[in-house]
Image: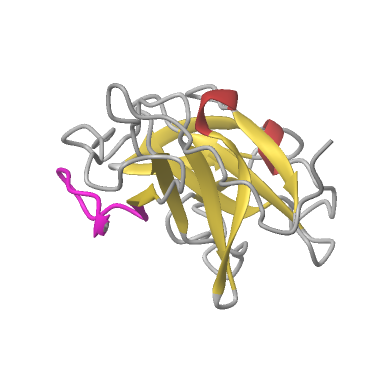
């Protein structure tokens, strides 16, 4: 089940239930709130790279108001953030003004309703939805589509089903 998160504004991510072969698939647990933020500790944060999703980390590993750097499979770095309301964002980690990979260490704020990160070096602000620099309209960083995936809950009394013994297994 996948749905675009709902909230007061258009959000840059979706919430999705992860299938778990060890559980009853009819017992999905919705771990999102009305703003689309996940609260389940088994939820993961994923970035869309080309046509596939890349798992960055457990959502519980992120702290609202702070960023982390993630090394992507192609060698690029992403700066991943949770704003103080728990909404995730991801942009390129390279500061285009200094060339340093430091945006994940920047401070998160808002300006005219837009959530941004300020570079820790030269203090330029980058909109976390669009990647555009709020201080130089000709400069931008890459943005990534983000989603939160939550595991399905195991039904009470349900657990892993033991594998049947193989017919060709040797007995001792």
Asked if residue 10 is positioned above or below residue 63 in the image, the reply reads below
Asked if residue 33 is positioned above or below residue 47 in the image, the reply reads above
- In the image: residue 45, left or right of residue 30: right
Residue at the spot 48% in from the left edge and 30% down from the top edge: 42
- In the image: residue 155, left or right of residue 126: left
Q: 124 or 117, which lies in front?
A: 117
Residue 40 point in image, percent of width and height = 38, 26
Asked whether 13 falls inside the magenta stretch, the response is yes
Residue 154 point in image, percent of width and height = 35, 31
Residue 133 point in image, percent of width and height = 55, 56
The prevailing secondary structure element of the residues shown in magenta is loop
Which residues fall within the magenta stretch? 2-14
Asked if residue 43 is positioned above or below residue 99 in the image, the reply reads above
Residue at the spot 52% in from the left edge and 65% down from the top edge: 137
Task: Tell which residue pokes out farthest to the bottom in this image.
Answer: 51
Report the quarter where the N terminus lies: bottom left
């Amino acid at each position: 089940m996948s749905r675009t998160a709902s909230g007061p504004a258009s959000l840059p991510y979706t919430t999705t239930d992860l299938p778990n072969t060890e559980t009853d698939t009819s017992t999905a647990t919705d771990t999102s709130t009305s703003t689309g933020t996940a609260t389940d500790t088994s939820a993961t944060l994923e970035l869309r790279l080309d046509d596939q999703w890349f798992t960055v980390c457990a959502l519980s590993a992120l702290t609202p108001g702070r960023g982390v750097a993630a090394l992507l499979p192609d060698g690029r770095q992403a700066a991943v953030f949770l704003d103080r309301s728990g909404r995730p964002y991801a942009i390129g980690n390279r500061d285009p003004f200094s060339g340093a990979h430091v945006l994940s260490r920047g401070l998160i704020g808002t300006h005219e309703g837009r959530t941004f990160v300020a570079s820790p070096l030269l203090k330029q602000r980058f909109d976390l939805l669009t990647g555009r620099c709020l201080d130089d309209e000709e400069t931008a960083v890459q943005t990534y589509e983000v989603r939160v995936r939550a595991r399905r809950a195991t039904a009470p009394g349900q657990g892993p089903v033991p594998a049947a013994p193989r017919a060709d297994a040797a007995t001792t």
